[in-house]
Image: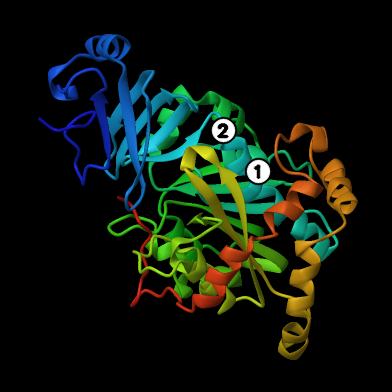
């Protein structure tokens, strides 16, 4: 028997086990009703690998959906973090804190574009984003006229619309400003003639054998920068960004993060590459994001002003951020659960151990030399 929801098509990364006895079950031998009955009776638990030697373990309260697409396993379950989307055994977003992840990914980049260009953003590209919550946050901005979201896995979108409508669902899909394209975001960016004010990459982590690794390479970023309007901003999720990385400790440990290499890779293409973090409890760690943009003027001027621009963005006037949100976002700052001017300063103020790790990290991610994040 396989210790999982069902016999998985790839490497097993998550386990459901009874905490009261040693037996296990599989989807292949039990109906949905039987499985839920056993969960209620035997107190089954959900386990997820976070990093080498560290697992998350929590009570599994309910299974809403458990299926496969041609790309990955897809599960919607309920734990102490509420309803949770899990793909290939890895938590993608949870009801408890998905707003913190999605607001952190979206709003700083749109606000930065407004500050850099002197006008509010109108066109946004989203790579990935199958939960539809990234598009939900983009569409809060009144100035946005067009959002193009390209996701590889139509099944994820369908499952999220059905079981996680609070993430965005039909409200997003029926918005006339929103266009959903089922396809490869890498191929789309390389072949589109359209340019955007902001490009947001809400994609799978760069794990070995995963579909997202090409979207973290220098070659991709060199092309993506040509798809930005003047003053345009590129932002990507960047995986685990522990505030106290193990790599800064004296003993040698396995490298589990790609945060530093992603910052470095974007810095090799853009004038400014800035990492920031938000704590996401359901992910078991602070989570990393990287924003990149070019400064106005020629190369000499850009080089001279890049550091100054970065420092200004790390610690702006909190009132100025709040004022922009109040002006740009439908229903203003009060509509957001996480992001505002003060939270912005916390997100971009990295702790000393993490800054030490980033100073040590020199690697760049390329097609020839990919770097993978830990995936259990």
- Residue drawn at x 71%, y 88% is 299
* 3 horizontally vs 343: left or right: left
- Residue 45: image tag: none
Residue 118, horizontal then vertical, whole percent: 85, 62
- Residue drawn at x 69%, y 59% is 348
Which of the two discs, 2 and 1, labels the residue nearer the N terminus? Answer: 1
Nearest the eye: 119 or 26? 26
Crowdedness of circle 1 by 10 Å Cα count: few (<14), some, many (20+)? many
For disc 2, the marked residue is 173
Q: Which residue of the protein is positioned furthest toward the bottom in this rendering?
A: 300
> Eyeballing the image, is 48 above or below 19?
below
Residue 261, horizontal then vertical, whole percent: 48, 70
Q: Tell me which corner region of the image, top left, top right, bottom left or bottom right, holds residue 308.
A: bottom right
Name the quadrant of the N terminus.
top left
- Residue drawn at x 26%, y 28% is 16
Crowdedness of circle 2 by 10 Å Cα count: few (<14), some, many (20+)? some
Q: Secondary structure at mark 1?
A: helix
Residue 91, horizontal then vertical, whole percent: 42, 39
> Eyeballing the image, is 361 above or below 108?
below
For disc 1, the marked residue is 103
> Eyeballing the image, is 130 above or below 187?
above
Distance in Å between CA atoms under marks 2 and 1:
19 Å
* 55 horizontally vs 324: left or right: left
Q: Tell me which corner region of the image, top left, top right, bottom left or bottom right, holds residue 363.
A: bottom left
> Eyeballing the image, is 176 above or below 28?
below
Residue 147, horizontal then vertical, whole percent: 62, 47
Residue 122 shows in the view: no
């Amino acid at each position: 028997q396989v210790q999982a929801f069902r016999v998985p098509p790839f490497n097993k990364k998550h386990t459901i086990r009874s905490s009261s006895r040693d037996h296990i079950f599989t989807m292949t031998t039990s109906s949905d009703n039987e499985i839920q009955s056993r969960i209620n009776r035997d107190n089954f638990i959900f386990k997820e690998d976070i990093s080498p030697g560290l697992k998350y373990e929590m009570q599994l309260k309910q299974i809403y959906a458990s299926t496969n697409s041609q790309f990955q396993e897809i599960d919607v379950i309920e734990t102490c973090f509420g309803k949770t989307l899990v793909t290939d055994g890895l938590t993608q977003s949870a009801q408890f804190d998905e707003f913190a992840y999605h607001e952190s990914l979206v709003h700083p980049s749109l606000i930065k574009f407004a500050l850099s260009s002197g006008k509010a953003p109108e066109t946004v590209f989203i790579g990935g984003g199958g939960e539809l919550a990234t598009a939900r946050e983009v569409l809060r901005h009144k100035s946005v006229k067009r959002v193009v979201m390209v996701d590889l896995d139509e099944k994820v979108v369908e499952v999220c619309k059905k079981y996680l409508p609070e993430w965005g669902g039909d409200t997003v899909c029926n918005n006339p400003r929103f266009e959903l394209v089922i396809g490869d975001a890498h191929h789309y960016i390389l072949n589109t003639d359209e340019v955007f004010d902001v490009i947001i990459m809400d994609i799978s982590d760069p794990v070995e054998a995963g579909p997202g690794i090409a979207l973290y390479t220098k070659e991709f970023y060199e092309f993506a920068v040509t798809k930005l309007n003047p003053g345009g901003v590129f932002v990507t999720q960047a995986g685990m960004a522990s505030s106290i990385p193990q790599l800064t400790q004296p003993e040698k440990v396995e490298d589990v993060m790609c945060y530093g290499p992603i910052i470095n890779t974007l810095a090799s293409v853009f004038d400014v590459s800035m990492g920031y973090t938000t704590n996401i409890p359901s992910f078991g760690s602070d989570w990393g994001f990287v924003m990149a943009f070019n400064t106005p003027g020629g190369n000499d001027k850009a080089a001279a002003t890049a550091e100054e621009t970065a420092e200004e963005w790390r610690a702006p006037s909190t009132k100025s951020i709040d004022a922009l949100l109040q002006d740009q976002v439908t229903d203003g700052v009060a509509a957001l659960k996480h992001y505002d001017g003060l939270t912005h300063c916390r997100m971009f103020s990295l702790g000393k151990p993490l800054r030490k790790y980033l100073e040590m990290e020199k690697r760049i991610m390329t097609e020839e030399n990919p770097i993978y994040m830990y995936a259990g």
